[in-house]
Image (cartoon, coloured by chain):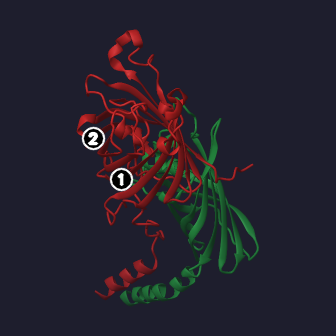
Amino acid sequence: MKLKLIILLLLISHPIYAQLERKLVNESQTVDLIFHAPRQINLFTVEPLEKKDLHFAIMHTFGTLDGGVQNLFGLDNGANIQFSFEYGVSRKFSLGIARSSRDKVYNIYGRYHFFQQTRDNKVPFSFSMMGAAGVNTSDYSFLGDDNPTFEERSSFAAQLMFARKFNDKFSFQVSPLAAYFVDPRPDYLIEGNSNLYFALGFSGKYKITGKSSLTLQWIPNLHSELKNNVGVGIDIEAGGHVFQMYFVTTQALNEQYLLAGGNGVPGEDFRIGFNVNRIFATGVKRKS
Amino acid sequence: MKKLIYRFLIAATTTFPFDLSAQEFKTTNGNVEFLSKASFNEFTGTSDHLNGLMDLTKKTFDFYLDLNTLKTGIGLRDRHMRENYLETKKYPFAEFSGMIQEPFTLQIGESREVTAKGKFKIHGVEKNISVPGKLTAVSDSELRLEAEFKLMLTDFNISIPSVMFYELSEEQVVTINSLLKKK
């Protein structure tokens, strides 16, 4: 007994291989990649930017698929293109500017991340919001005296984003959206005629391989006459870029037009869409 | 006979540990850098969270790094790295433990080139490697360790993005610089 005790003591004080206990630096670190990029199909996600990161996104939607091969499945029919640059002011807040070719709308927007889901589930989901203000810069001089003023060309959007990564494969986001047009003229490329629009966005991501996911989007428009937005796509990460290819029912790319712009009938009026996301770091010093 | 064993054991437990622990050096904030030199894009992943223990008497060492702390300077790239390449949720640590090969003594202010041989583990794959390094006795309670070695990512089943954009190099140059303090 005594001998055993002494041997035990010997073993404790003389470990053959001194080994350190493996400890994580941060047990409740935030979950990585709820979505592949700060955007998915038409909607913003809760994916934040680091301080001084610059997110560049170029997004396109084309004509409807029903033209068939004759119109190369809509690719011949004028694309709507949006460029956007978003800059990480801090890890919580980013500011961006976007320009969408449809009605030549410039949008400035911000995203704020209230909190983020953590691996140990102490915070079970991420919560962010975005707000945008836009101006339509199309030429309406043909309207003569009725040419809309700057104020009448303005529109606004707001979105709350609640997202959770349920497991390594599946993530889901619910985003209530609102948009406001100061003067919703029929001259604008929108289908609604009210000032205020509401919708509820649902985004899903299902990982199929390490670097690609199936994506899904459904935005029931709470304006009954403006059909719901449906999108299905695929996200592919390729060395620093995230490519997103999808079929979607709307040609709109910014938030205001997404809500007021109307949608086609799923199955009949799908279009091809394509986003490229790229993040640049502006705060990193180059080593020579 | 039994008495003799007791005596020996008691002597062993009471005398050696003091001397041995006096030769143990530890760090929790060593610096590690992974340099990826691809044709178009060169970047580093760095961390200041290297944990290490060296025992100069037994010539053993044990180092580990929480790979979640590696930063490349681009947040999204870090997240892709953790999620797709290193898979840090499944394999959070890079580990290296083993023995220093050659016998050596160190006076304060002196440096020695040494070879560290042992098991290196990352991404769940374990390999025996041998790494040259430099030990410097900064003071009687501080030991500096510097090392540089190369790792091939495919040796550890870490796939690199192939076709479109060569951003990540297959070969990673690992640089370690850490000041260990006497325990």
Badge 1 amino acid? Met
Q: Position of residue A241 (x, y in %)?
A: 51, 38
Q: Residue at x 47, y 31 (%)?
A: A102
Residue farthest to the front?
A: A145
Q: Quadrant of residue A137?
A: top right
Nearest to the observer: residue A137 or residue A144: A144
Q: Position of residue A255 (x, y in %)?
A: 41, 42
Residue farthest to the left?
A: A224
The hue in which chain A appears in the rendered picture of the protein: red
N-term-proximal mark, 2 vs 1: 1
Circle 2 residue:
A221
Rendered image: mark on residue A161: 1
Q: Is residue A82 in view from this perspective?
A: no
Badge 2 amino acid? Asn
B31 versus B41 height, above or below: below
Nearest to the observer: residue B171 or residue A98: A98
Q: Which image quadrant: the C terminus of chain B?
A: bottom right
Q: Residue at x 23, y 38 (%)?
A: A224
